[in-house]
Amino acid sequence: MRSTFAGLSIASSGLFAAQRALDITGHNISNANTRGYSRQRLNQAAQDPMSIVGGQGQLGLGVKMQFISQVRDEMLDIKYRTEVNTLGEWEEKYNSISQIEAIFNEPTDTGIRKVMDNFFEGLNSLSKDPSSPTTRAVFIQSAVALAQNFNHMTDNFEKMIRDANEEVESSVRSINSMGSQIARLNKQILEAELDGSRANDLRDARNLLIDDLSKLVDIQVKEVPISNGNSSTLSILIQGTPLVNHTDTNVLELETNIDHPMFLDGKNAMDSTGLISEERTDLSTIKVSNIKWATGSSLDQTKLGGTIGGQLQQRDGFKDENKGIPYYVRFTSEFAKSFAETINAAHGAGYALGATTPSGLDIFGSNGGGTINAGNIKVNQALLDDPTLLALGGVSGAKDDNKNAIAMLELRNNKSFVSQIVYSPTSKIVLGEGTPEDVIKTMISTLGVDGQEAKRMFNNQQYLAEEIDSFRMSVSGVSQDEEMSNMIKFQHAYNAAARMITTVDEMIDVIINRMGRVGL
């Protein structure tokens, strides 16, 4: 037979459960706009019943509160982190290509094609009036403008590469910082859950860090339950090496002051036969930082993925299958080199005013000597000092001889112009061919295609990440309407339980204070 006071225990269990549920509802409402918060709910079950003597069944003894759980879908977390990782990579590519397009500034009146047009227009004017000092001076200034345009583009490209290197270094610091924070949270969660509790808010903070980390770099998350309690050990791996091993952390290090990969590639351009004797010196002043594990474990920084993967590709990529900022540095440099060599060869075969032998003088040279590229191309100082040295004559130095000016002008429509990288007689990379303008159009078209692809992929990934995050929020996010409904439900439950206690109290009052007093 149950105790007379069992009714109070039953009613009070309902009162406390409703009170706990109201507290959780209030916590949910308070964190409705907290980033990364997962709504919580009270899991409860009926108390173990009491058997009634005589096989009359079992009598319930109220409700027991089990634990406070999170409402979260781990599969959606995995999908979101996969998509946001790809988003981070394409976001970097899209932002970088947008800046490259701004540097080329095509098609505008200040782009490379317009500056090159002005150069040939200057030659056209010279072919009509080869003896005019003014026309000669204007042409030389158009050549200076062309060289400076190449220099300015290279300066901007190099600044972008330095900025990308700083972003890589910042990303490494962020990865290490997030790894340390996750390790600390792992320890706090383990300590809080050893007694069977669930550290829901700490888990939310950890999941938010993992979300942010997954955008920065491609990671694998491994969580293994432990034998006692409800806790687990969690590890974060990058390319199979732990960044976080539960409460321990590994560290990514920066190896600084390293020559840029494209410059190292250019230094190795000479083949063993000596047939190729010119090094490529593009980006020779650029120093970058490479990433490695502090423990010495192997790391392939070309496959890190995420934001840092996009930053590294834009900083280092110079080959056709892996285009980054250096690819366009190489393109403009090889074009400037081919263009200068073609013009120089034609000019050197001509005659200057009053000369009786071919000039042999170049229009374009390089700062510091060596192979001409977009960064060092300049106009021959001798021509700047004395425009009469322009070799416009084709057969003599007569002031009305314009045959060589016409020959140089015809290079504008020379369909055999080729911009290429030659490493050996059997190793060539053709960057563009046709007229000089055709090669420039090829370069701009390539950039346009890359830009469209980057924009499309960025927009697609942004949409996918937002859609999956929306699905996640539909599961774990706080709905104000639902919580308000729960609040009313639990309020009524609380009031009903309180009324039940009052009723039982009145019954006990009858037994204690009034039973047996009849007739007194």
Image (spheres, rainbow, N blue to C red):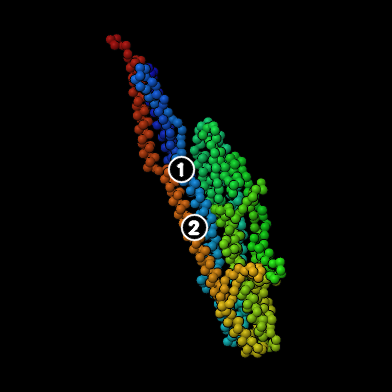
Image coordinates for residue 308, horizontal then vertical, percent: 57, 54
Q: Amino acid at mark 1?
A: Asp
Question: What residue is rendered at 54% in x and 74% in y?
Answer: 438
Question: What residue is rendered at 58% in x and 77% in y?
Answer: 416
Residue at label 1? 73
Q: CA distance from mark 1 to mark 2?
A: 26 Å
Determine which of the numbered discs, if any, sits on residue 181 in the image.
none
| Element type where label 2 sits in the image | helix
Asked if residue 116 can be seen in this view, the reply is: no
Q: Residue furthest front?
A: 426
Q: Residue furthest top?
A: 520
| Element type where label 1 sits in the image | loop
Image coordinates for residue 406, horizontal then vertical, percent: 59, 84
- Mark 2 neighbour class, 10 Å CA radius: few under 14, some 14 to 19, many 20 or more: many
Q: Amino acid at mark 2?
A: Phe
Image coordinates for residue 272, horizontal then vertical, percent: 71, 66
Q: Residue 31 occupies which quadrant of the picture?
A: top left
Asked if residue 50 can be seen in this view, the reply is: yes
Residue situated in front as seen by the camera: 365 or 90: 90
Q: Judge from the rendering whether residue 456 lies leftward or rightward of residue 338; answer left or right.
A: left
Residue at label 2? 458
Q: Judge from the rendering whether residue 131 lies leftward or rightward of residue 67; answer left or right.
A: right
Question: What residue is rendered at 56% in x and 56% in y?
Answer: 310
Quadrant position of the C terminus in the picture: top left
Which callout, 1 or 2, points at the residue further toward the start of the chain? 1
Image coordinates for residue 198, horizontal then vertical, percent: 50, 35
Q: Residue furthest left?
A: 519
Question: What residue is rendered at 50% in x and 41% in y?
Answer: 204
Quadrant position of the N terminus in the picture: top left
| 193 over 394 or under it: above or below | above
- Mark 1 neighbour class, 10 Å CA radius: few under 14, some 14 to 19, many 20 or more: few
Residue situated in front as seen by the camera: 51 or 162: 51
